Amino acid sequence: MNKFNLHKTSVLTLLLINLIAQPNFSQITYSIAITSTQVINPAAQKLTGISFDARSSGVYTIGSNSFTVGYYSPTSGTLLTGVQSAFNRIIMNGVRYPGNPEIYNWNWRYSIGPVASRTPQILGPGMPSQTLAFGFDEFMNMVQAKGLSKSEVQIMVNLYASNGEPNPALLAADWVEYCNAANDGSNPRGGVDWAAVRAANGYSTPYGVKIWNIGNEPWQPGELGNTSAGASSYTSLALPIIDSMLIVDPTIQITLAALGASNSAWNGVILGSALVGKVWGLSPHNFYDEVISTPQPSIFQCEGQLKSIAAGAKAKGLKIIVGDHAHDCPFNDQDRGMRWRGTLATADWLLMASQLDNIDRANYWIYGAPKNTWHPIRLNGNGTYTFMGLAQLYETFGTKFLDKCVLTSVVDTSGAATTLARGAAFFSNNNANANVIIVNTDTLINKKVEAPSIPGFNLQKVSLITAPTLDTDTSTTTILNPLYTSKYSLPIASVLLFEYQNITTNITANKTLANEFTLYPNPTNTTLYLSKAIDNVSIYNLLGEKVFENKGINTSISVAEFDDGIYVLRSNNYPLKFIVNH
């Protein structure tokens, strides 16, 4: 992604800014329908991936002034002290590399080996010819330190001639060999033994990178253009690159650039080309906003395009990776996408994407350079850093998007349409935890939402994420109590997070309570007796609903009014099952 679009400030936008802090309370109530048996995305955490700019140790020059553009020292390649605390908060569930340097003809070979011997290269407008102290191997070390498998890295390869290398097919094949070839002396391609070079640089074990993107946005007007002719040129350029890469490692997963719906001029050529039989997936980009007067699509328009291209790809046996997505940042307001306005839209986009079939993963544009137009971590004028609202969202969603996402819908209990609310439910693979997230993008009317009932799960915590205004840099998180009868406040421009725990979780592991006392008779019909007195007792049915609570001392509990069924008694979080059978 590399674009700068000017927005016309609309009266509506100004009105919304004023109204966000002046809510109009309403009786609108939402319920959230969850079909836990219908998994939409079996690896939902990968939707919270990021792109990372390889220029993170680069230097930018304006006139006679130079400054570091990224997180790393231009001389040592080590993390800058001031950004350490913010960097530590980044959750990395996937990462795409190298970002914009790919379109500036960078050569990855110049980013490896001893820093003193790396060849300088120009990495973008305003950037002098320079070496990168934080190069490719340092990036891979960072990925591993963040807990992400190196095989989960997505690499973008050049489509055109690069610095010092006129043949993009050779450059791409060499990179695949450097990443994935065994250091066994075989060197099957001849020439430079890139596995041996990697080993000499201190990395004997192959990285095993699986996902490789061909180009970035070749349909841009400055490149091939968004036409069928442009797409045909792209396939011609991509073919020798793909073939050369597959010779090195036929197991890699290659994606092609995609644009718009499946029937767009560009995608029509791509899906009809012979390349479909050689690649693993397609990689569209989404840059969105909520302002009608701008050329950027809304979230609903993005949803329509993604549904279309995902279905078209699936029909060809291909997956979708959303290579980059973000709220638009106009040149005259480059914080917009990272403030609460853009954060709210991105939350909406992520929940939308979680409900679409055949979306393998997605990456937010872009981390690594706090002086970029897009900067989840912002470098301030006084040298400090701000962990923006967008970064806070990814810090939260990066852990709350659990392993799998299931079919979820938001319903207005009055029967009205719910175009300004979206929800998604996530479950861990071991079924121990579940999270439900709902976003209210309405900036005028507060809502209420009924706490979802998930059979077998107990609601543990409800958190509200919001900000004072749409243009606030950061968000706040508040723990909520229900308004009444399990209904919770869903204010304007907010996100609500429900966290659940399986009520039978750790029954086998946590036998301490069971060893100390028993429940009898079990089954029971009128009274449940405890073999010893305990306090803080709660009882839940298999819908996760609390049907009894007593914080005092308990030796017996009346169950005469309980329905027949299985129940779980909890005391200090230790669970025991019992059965009521009248």
Image (spheres, grey):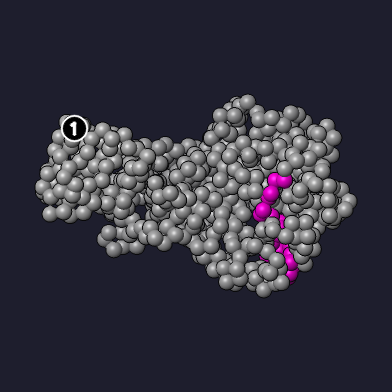
Q: Is residue 218 magenta?
A: yes
Q: Judge the density around disc 1: few (<14), some (14-19), many (≥20) Cα neighbours within 10 Å.
A: few
Residue at 31% x, 34% y: name it. Answer: 512
Q: Is residue 327 magenta?
A: no
Residue 102 makes an appearance in the image:
no
Can you say whether 296 is above or below 57 in the image? below
Segment tinted magenta in the rendering:
206-235
Residue 123 makes an appearance in the image:
yes
Magenta stretch, main secondary structure class:
loop
**What x and y, as percent, mark residue 179?**
74, 47
Front residue (pair 337, 198): 198
Front residue (pair 444, 278): 278
**What x and y, as percent, mark residue 116?**
83, 32
Count of numbered badges drawn on the protein: 1
485 sits left or right of 340 in the view: left
Residue at 75% x, 34% y: name it. Answer: 133
Which residue reaches farthest right? 191
234 sits left or right of 500 in the view: right
Of the 4 image quadrants, the one containing the C terminus is bottom left
Can you say whether 244 is above or below 446 in the image? below
Which residue reaches farthest bottom? 272
Can you say whether 295 is above or below 133 in the image? below
Residue that numbered label 1 is attached to: 532
470 sits left or right of 2 in the view: left
Residue at 15% x, 48% y: name it. Answer: 524
Type of amino acid at the residue the image marks with label 1: Lys
Q: Secondary structure at mark 1?
A: strand
**What x and y, as percent, mark residue 25?**
28, 47
516 sits left or right of 136 in the view: left
**What x and y, as percent, mark residue 311?**
54, 68
Can you say whether 237 is above or below 512 in the image? below
